[in-house]
Each structure stands twice: as C-alpha cells, then as structure tokens.
Image: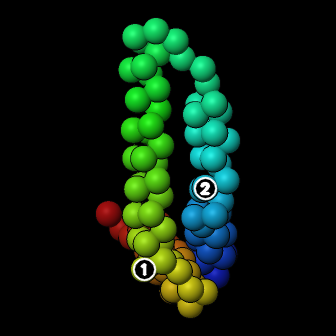
Amino acid sequence: MYTALARFGYGLVKKIRPSKVKKFLKPGLDKASKAKFTGKAGAVEAKGIKLLKGGASKGYKGYRSLYGATLGSSAKRKVTSAATGGYLLGSFMSDD
C-alpha cells in the first residue's frame, strides 16, 4: 500500500512541473494580450492585462524556484512523494 501511495504522489508531483503549468497558462495570457480594447475603458483593461501578465511572470518565477527547491530533482521528488505517501498511509491507519 505504501508503494502505491508513493507512486501516486510521484505522479501528481510530475504533473505540476513548471513547464506543464506554463503550457497551461500561456494560451490564456496570449489570448488576453492580443485582444483589442477601445476608449477609456479599453485603456484601463489594457493596463490590467499588462499587470496580469507581469504578475503571472513574477508568480511563475516564484513557483519555479519553489518547485526547484522542494521537487527539482528526481531524488527530491521521490523523497517528497514517499513522505506524503507515508503521511497519508499513517493518517488512514490512525485510531483517531
């Protein structure tokens, strides 16, 4: 049971890699930046899109560094997924 939980955790960790997150976010940001805005409201919307893109860029950099520090290598992913699997197994088997 422990190995199955560790394998499940490892699969989840691999699905949230920064490259996959970027591929998920990129089409929406590209579509928003190509939209045409007119008038005073359009200027505000265009500025909002620029802020959103800047915030997404900073957030992605932070996520990438956090991921690298905790799950950046194969060994770190295995240890983290094993620890998560062990914790889940322990919580299922506890008498609380």
Residue sitting at 47 percent across and 58 percent down?
Answer: 60
The amino acid type found where label 1 is placed reads Ala
Residue matched to label 1: 69
Instruction: Determine whether label 2 and label 1 are within 8 Å by CB.
Output: no
Above or below 60: residue 9: below
Of residue 39 and residue 90, the one placed in the foreground of this image is 39
Q: Position of residue 4 (x, y in %)?
A: 66, 75
One can see residue 93 in this view: no
Of residue 5 and residue 14, the one placed in the foreground of this image is 14
Q: Position of residue 26 (x, y in %)?
A: 63, 47
Q: Quadrant of the N terminus?
A: bottom right
Of residue 70 and residue 5, the one placed in the foreground of this image is 70
- Relative side of 19 to 85, left or right: right
Residue matched to label 2: 22
Above or below 7: residue 27: above
Above or below 5: residue 78: below
Q: Position of residue 56 (x, y in %)?
A: 46, 48
Q: Position of residue 44 (x, y in %)?
A: 39, 20
The amino acid type found where label 2 is placed reads Lys
